Amino acid sequence: MSKNFKYPSLYELEQVLGIIADRSFLNDFAQNRGIFITNANKEELARELSNLNYEESDLEAIRNEAYNISSNNTLSGFQIKSTENQFNLKNIYEWIRENSKFGIEQKLSQLVTVPSTELPTFKGSISYTKKKVGRMEFLQSEESTFEFFLIEKGEGLWQVEIDSTRSTDSKELKKLFEDNTLKSTTTFEQIEHALLGTDQTISFFDNLATTGLNADWRFVDVKHLTLKKGKNEERDISQDQSEEIVEEIVEEAELVGITQAILQGENLRENSFVKNSVRSNYQFTAMTYEFEHLKEPLIIEVKAEFKGRPKVFEVAITKKEERLGLGGLKQEAALPINRNRAIRSEFWNNAKKVFEELVMGVTG
């Protein structure tokens, strides 16, 4: 066993096992080790398995499965403001759960307190079944599970962060709270593309290159950029098709020019390619940044994107590498689950500050 090996706490094991959406992995993992737990849902199975003792090879299998899942996750969110006295989103969620005030196809987990956080933070998960029409008109069921965090930021102010693989998950949770809170006293705010003008979309992504992460990270490169026609020139085709067509316009040479402009501290709106794009009524909808850690041999690519209908901002880490040896050769790196989410959360929260400054003139 490695000298640096540290056995995870009961809380850590339960949380990691809980994020593994593939129920078949949990079943196979347990049964291959002679563990048979019947009539248990995924939450109960994760809780039971977390109480057992494992060898390092067992923990490595759990860790690898969780890494693979967390690598595909995006983080999005919204804020809830209320003028009600003693407004408590945690209590509202528990009331929704206990009184079955949710869809018949939904399963709501209990909330757990997240330890060692600056603000009161609670974690939960929702599973739901989505039905879709198959090729032969039969209804097919598709199971989806996502995690979320409720963060109490002040009196009557709560932030909700969703860690998921689907852009629609944020909409599911937002609707759940909208349906169970008073519309007259409660408002919901999210980072929406529709609230930004063309120049503001450019400023938004431009600012994130230097303010998205803390001073331990250095912006290196723009790896990808997505543009889309403005509201007056929407095409009558699907969102995915539209973005795929527009992406072909952004060539490598333009990306190099945009990177250089950011590194030199220039206003991105003065870049010749960006100017031409604005004249053609294109808006920025997504950008992928490469960042390098100044204290560790770690390099990540962060994709910041407005996605869904309406287009809401979300963040994903699409690539993780580390430099090895004196030659600095790159190889794929594993990023611990909690750190992966923490980086995405930091980037999303900094994006919210940029958005509020652009839209409402809010600073600080």
Image (spheres, grey):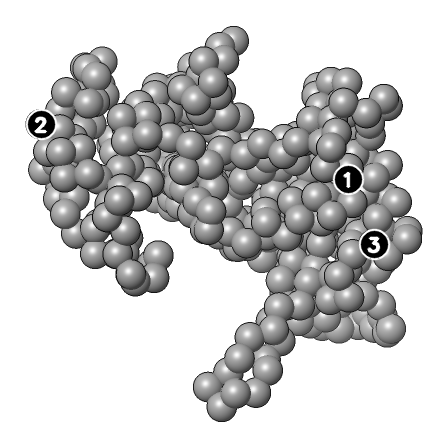
Count residues near mark 3 (Cα–Cα under 10 Å), then give few for <14, some for 14-19, many for 20+: few
**Element type at marker 2?**
helix
Residue drawn 86% across the image and 23% down it: 86
Q: Nearer the viewer, residue 316 or 7?
A: 316
The reply to whether residue 234 is in sight is yes
Q: Horizontally, is 361 left or right of 283 in the view?
A: right
Residue 272, numbered label: 2
The span from disc 2 to disc 3 (Cα, nearest Å) is 54 Å
Residue 181, numbered label: 1
The amino acid type of the residue labelled 1 equals Thr
The span from disc 1 to disc 2 (Cα, nearest Å) is 48 Å
Task: Report the residue marked by disc 3.
Answer: 101
Q: Are marks 2 and 3 in contact (CB under 8 Å)?
A: no
The amino acid type of the residue labelled 3 equals Lys
Residue drawn 14% across the image and 39% down it: 280
Residue 290 falls in which quadrant of the image?
A: top left
Q: Nearer the viewer, residue 217 or 322?
A: 217
The span from disc 3 to disc 1 (Cα, nearest Å) is 11 Å
Residue 255, horizontal then vertical, whole percent: 17, 35
